[in-house]
Structure formats: C-alpha cells, structure tokens
Image (spheres, grey):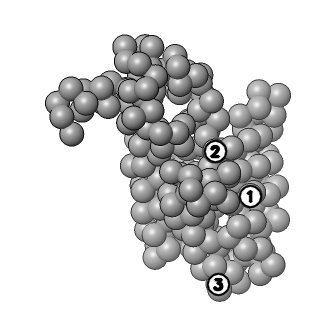
C-alpha cells in the first residue's frame, strides 16, 4: 500500500473507531469520511461496505474472544467457563454499541466481511457449550446457533436503556435455563476481578 493510501486507511480507522464508539455501529459513513478529510469514494476503496470497516476495527477483539474460549475449554469448571465467556462476549457487544445486529446478520450472509469472524465466535461458544453438556452441566437440547441467538438477545436488551437495569437478572435467568445446576456465578466474581485489574 502506498504511503498516502496507508495514511488514509489509518485515519479512516481512527475516525471510525471514535465515531462508532460515540454513535454506534450504524453511524454515517459519509460523516466518517468527512471527519477523516477524505472523499466517500476513498472510504469505499478501502472498505467496500460497513461490514468491512467493522471487521477491520474489531478483528483483534473477535480473535481475542475466540482465543479466550479456547483457554476456557481446558481450565476450571465447564459451566463456569461457559458463563464467564457469555459474560465477556455480552460485555464486548455492549462496549461496541450497535454491533449485535450486523453480527447476527453476518452469520447468515457468507458474503459479509464479518461472516468468518462471527462464525468463528459461534463455533467457540458451541465448543464451550458442548464441553458443559458432556460434563452434565448444560442442557442437551441447546445447540451453538441457539446459544448465539441467546447472546444476541441478551446483548440487545443490555443496549436498551429501559432494560439495562435488569440485564444482570435476565442474564442469570437465561444461564439458569442453560445450565443443569443453577449457580451464582463464580464466573461473575472472576469477571469483576478482571475488570478491577
């Protein structure tokens, strides 16, 4: 990539990160281009779609979440691992307001730039679920796609100001329906400790 093209690419990513953080993932691409001081055509040359821009911004976070699921596969209690990962992915979607709809749509759209990352995340969650099921800690009539749908629903609820205050209770109710033995989460304590670090 030429130096001027790389400069535009980096500036677009920086501006998009700032605008998406403030306004959500459905913010105007025209505003991003204008604030980055490039034309809309330049934005589209680098990022042919909103999903391509989101994928470039979130790639490392998606990879970190998938790696985290792999780590939780081999450590500790399978139910706690599943709950902790669910909390972390829901926290991630909350930090990136408006991302859940593009993620859910990308699962079904193999042409989406987000498709591969989202399918990888769904598979990571499915593997944690399968481990918990094999250990007798999670109900057997739930699959990875349904788990991803539950994540999307909980993440969406957390984004809604009128429901945010109930999000922890709803999380506990949903995970209580997933797990065969309800538990007040050791996973929640671990997440709280991680946030304090």
Q: Is residue 184 visible?
A: no
Spatial separation of the CA atoms under disc 2 and disc 1 = 13 Å
Disc 1 packing (10 Å; few <14; some 14–19; many ≥20): few
Q: Secondary structure at mark 1?
A: helix
Disc 2 packing (10 Å; few <14; some 14–19; many ≥20): some
Which quadrant of the figure has residue 82?
Answer: bottom right
Q: Earlier in the sequence, mark 2 or mark 1?
A: 2
Q: Which mark is residue 149?
A: 1
| Residue located beneath label 2 in the image | 102
Residue 58, position as x, y percentages in the image: 45, 44
Q: Earlier in the sequence, mark 3 or mark 1?
A: 3
> Image point 74% across, 41% down: which residue?
156
Vertically, is 133 above or below 59?
below
Relative depth, front residue between 123 and 173: 123
Residue 49, position as x, y percentages in the image: 52, 39
Vertically, is 131 above or below 125?
below
Judge from the rendering whether residue 94 lies leftward or rightward of residue 45; answer left or right: right
The label nearer to you, 2 versus 3, is: 2
Q: Which mark is residue 135?
A: 3
Judge from the rendering whether residue 133 lies leftward or rightward of residue 36; answer left or right: right
Quarter of the image that includes the N terminus:
top left
Q: Secondary structure at mark 3?
A: loop
Q: Is residue 55 visible?
A: yes
């Amino acid at each position: 990539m030429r130096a001027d093209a790389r400069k535009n690419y980096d500036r677009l990513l920086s501006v998009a990160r700032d605008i998406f953080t403030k306004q959500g993932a459905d913010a105007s691409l025209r505003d991003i281009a204008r604030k980055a001081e490039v034309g809309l055509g330049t934005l589209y040359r680098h990022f042919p779609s909103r999903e391509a821009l989101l994928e470039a911004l979130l790639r490392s976070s998606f990879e970190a979440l998938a790696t985290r699921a792999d780590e939780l596969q081999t450590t500790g209690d399978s139910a706690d691992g599943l709950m902790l990962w669910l909390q972390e992915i829901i926290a991630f979607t909350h930090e990136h307001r408006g991302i859940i709809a593009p993620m859910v749509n990308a699962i079904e759209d193999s042409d989406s730039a987000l498709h591969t990352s989202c399918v990888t995340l769904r598979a990571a969650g499915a593997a944690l679920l399968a481990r918990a099921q094999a250990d007798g800690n999670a109900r057997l009539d739930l699959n990875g796609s349904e788990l991803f749908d539950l994540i999307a629903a909980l993440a969406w609820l957390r984004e809604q100001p009128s429901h945010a205050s109930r999000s922890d209770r709803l999380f506990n109710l949903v995970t209580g329906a997933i797990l065969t033995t309800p538990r007040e989460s050791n996973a929640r304590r671990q997440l709280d400790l991680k946030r304090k670090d």
